[in-house]
Amino acid sequence: KELRYAFKVFSQYRTMPKVTVFGSARTPPDHPITLEANDFGRRMVEAGWMVITGAGSGVMGGAQAGAGREQSFGLNIRLPFEQEANPWIAEDPKLITFKYFFTRKLFLLKESAAACFLPGGFGTCDEVFEVLTLIQTGKTSMIPVLLLDIPGGGYWKAWDAYVREEMVGRGFIAQEDVHLYRVTETVEDAGREILDFYREFHSHRF
C-alpha cells in the first residue's frame, strides 16, 4: 500500500530533477548546519530542482524551508519518539508517511538524481553507506553524492579520513571507491558538483 501511494504521488513530478537531503533531526533552527541545509535547499530550487527530505526537523526542516513547500517532498516515518512532519511540509499532498523504513529508504533514493548529506547520527551514516554500497555494486545508477559541512567543519573530514585510513588502508574497499563521493564545505560547491555532473555526463534520470 505504501509503495502504491508513493508511486502515485511522485508520478506527477517524474520529469523534475530531485535531490534528497539527509542529516540530523536534532539541530536547532538557528544551528549553522540547519542554516546550511536551508541555503542548499534554496540553491537547488533556484537551479530548477526539487528537494526531498525525511520530513523531520533539524537539517530536514532547514532544507524544506529553503526549498519551499511547492518544490519539496517529505517522506516521514512513524517512530515512537521522533518525528512529526516539519511545518514546511505538514499537510502537503507531497508528504508521505511510511510505517516501514525499507519502503521509505527505497523512495529517498529511487526518486533522487543526487544525494546531499549534512552531519547527522546513525540514520544519516546508514544512508551514506547504503547509497555508496548500491553505487559501488552497480545496483543503482551513478549519481552525485555530496557530503556537505559548514565552512571549517570537521564532521565529514573525520569520516573521510576513517574511510581512507581504515577501509582503503586495510583493503576492505578499493582506492577508487573514495571517488564515489565528494566532501565539500559550501553550498555553492555542492550545487556546482551536482549540476556539473549532469552537464558533463548527460546521464539524466529525469
Image: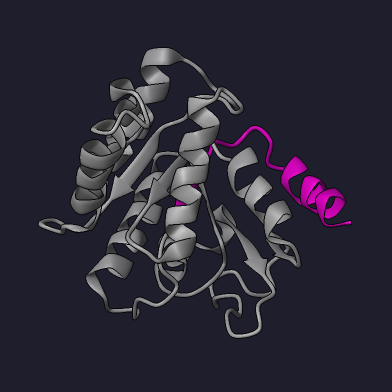
Residue 23 position, x and y percent, is: 41, 61
- In the image, residue 12 lies in the stretch drawn in magenta: yes
Magenta segment boundaries in residue numbering: 1-22
Task: Return the residue found at the far top.
Answer: 201
Establish if 81 lies above or below 182: below
Establish if 46 lies above or below 139: below
Task: Return the residue found at the far right.
Answer: 1
Quarter containing the N terminus: bottom right
- Choose between 74 and 174: the one closer to the eye: 174
Is residue 50 visible in the rendered image? The answer is yes
- Choose between 195 and 54: the one closer to the eye: 54
Residue 52 position, x and y percent, is: 55, 53
Quarter containing the C terminus: top right
Establish if 76 lies above or below 16: below
In the visual, does 77 lie left or right of 45? right
In the image, what residue occupies the spot 59% across and 28% down? 140
Establish if 143 lies above or below 150: above
In the image, what residue occupies the spot 41% across and 73% down? 58
Question: Which image quadrant is residue 122 in?
Answer: bottom left
In the image, what residue occupies the spot 40% across and 37% down? 145
